[in-house]
Image: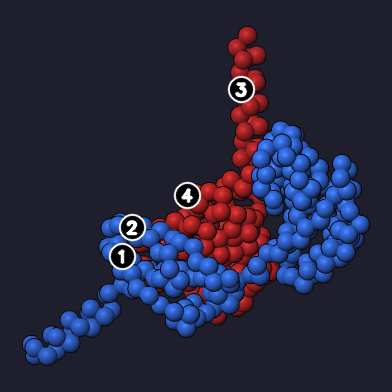
Amino acid sequence: MLKSIVKPGVIALLACLAGTVAAEEAAVGTVKTAKGTVTIEHAGQKIAAAPGAKVFAADRVLTGADGSVGITLRDSTLLSAGPNSTLAINMFAFDPTTHAGAIDATLKRGTLAVISGKIAKASPDTVAFRTPTLTLGVRGTEFVLEAADRRD
Amino acid sequence: MDIGLIALAVILYGIFTQESPDRVVLLPDPEGKTGAVVVKSAAGEQRLDAAFAAAAVGSRGAIATSQTDAAGVTLRYGDALGAQPRRPVSFTVYFISGTDELTPASMPVLEQVKQAAAGRAAPEIVAIGHTDRVGTLEDNDALSKKRAEVVRATLMSVGIPSTQIESAGRGEREPVVATADEVAEAKNRRGEINIR
């Protein structure tokens, strides 16, 4: 009796976990431009990024003193970072049917240019760009962001 | 100690410990339109909605607004802006009424898509289906997904690698011509090909 109750629960849990893993493994963006030293930190590994490289949620993208990088996210948000920059993609979700989703990214240092995409158009309240001192709510727009190098 | 030396030490200390603020500058789009951003910090909130409006936020959260210009932005953010990916482009194809076949006039568009994709670094194509507002939301989601699959298959038939093409159905959510519900509108029954 107990077994028959537990089993569907376990299966549902496994299905749920599988879903989570699949969602985490889907790329959230693609590198389109890369100049100089560009590194993606993904799952504890450092990968030299060239055009075509995939970016995932929880990745960090770093540029060297000679580096710059341009990334297009799945909702057509365009991100580009100048030299000496660290960008963390904290979270990204996008439903291509409804355009519902969320973006949360932090520029830890350096410079970042942003052209907002389909998520900001459909649900601007779910898009946030951060630096160590500010959080930016986006109302469908283009902007540049700079985070001071605090050397801490 | 010499008072001058102390003053110098104080000034130097100030220079080396003062943190530069984080900044944001709102930019106009290529058509000259400007959106808005809301800057939030530990100390407050400030909305920017003019082209080249800027805000600087220090470590304590104080928000100082100012106005810059295109030259100032290029000077400070030229490298980041220079690395910007190309803006996505969209093409539209139409279906023969009541079928999932593309109109003959849509065929040359596929060749344009192929060329546009070939000219981009790491191109990604999304075939998107759209419907008019006849029928339920759910039925139109299914129909639009089917249309997207037809567009995707057609793009593959002209030689675009399948790995570059995704498909998505938008249902009746994004009409070209706004109509009341249950109104048939040929212009809304379409396929969109987005290249990014």
For marks 3 and 1, give the one nearer the viewer. Answer: 1
Residue at image x 81%, y 64%?
A: B113
Q: Quadrant of the N terminus of chain A?
A: top right
Along the viewing direction, whichever of B165 and A117 lies nearer the viewer = A117
Instruction: Check chain identity for marks 1 and 4: say if they share one.
Output: no
Horizontal placement of B96 versus A84: left or right?
right
For the colour red, the matching chain is A
Location of mark 4 (residue): A125
Location of mark 1 (residue): B63
Quadrant for residue A68, please give it: bottom right
Q: Is residue A87 above or below residue B165?
A: below
Instruction: Check chain identity for marks 2 and 3: say if they share one.
Output: no
CB-based contact (under 8 Å), mark 1 and mark 2: yes
Residue at image x 51%, y 70%?
A: B28
CA distance separating discs 2 and 3:
46 Å
Location of residue A61 in the rendering, given as x and y in whole percent from the top left corner: 55, 64
Specify which label sits upstream in the sequence, 1 or 2: 2
Q: Which mark is residue A9?
A: 3
Going by the numbered disc 3, the residue's amino acid type is Gly
CB-based contact (under 8 Å), mark 2 and mark 3: no
Q: Quadrant of the C terminus of chain A?
A: bottom left
- Mark 2: which secondary structure? strand
Quadrant for residue B47, please give it: bottom left
Residue at image x 65%, y 14%?
A: A4
CA distance separating discs 1 and 4:
21 Å
Location of mark 2 (residue): B45
Horizontal placement of B116 versus B111: left or right?
left
Instruction: Check chain identity for marks 3 and 4: say if they share one.
Output: yes
Going by the numbered disc 1, the residue's amino acid type is Ile
Q: Is residue B178 above or below residue B47?
A: above
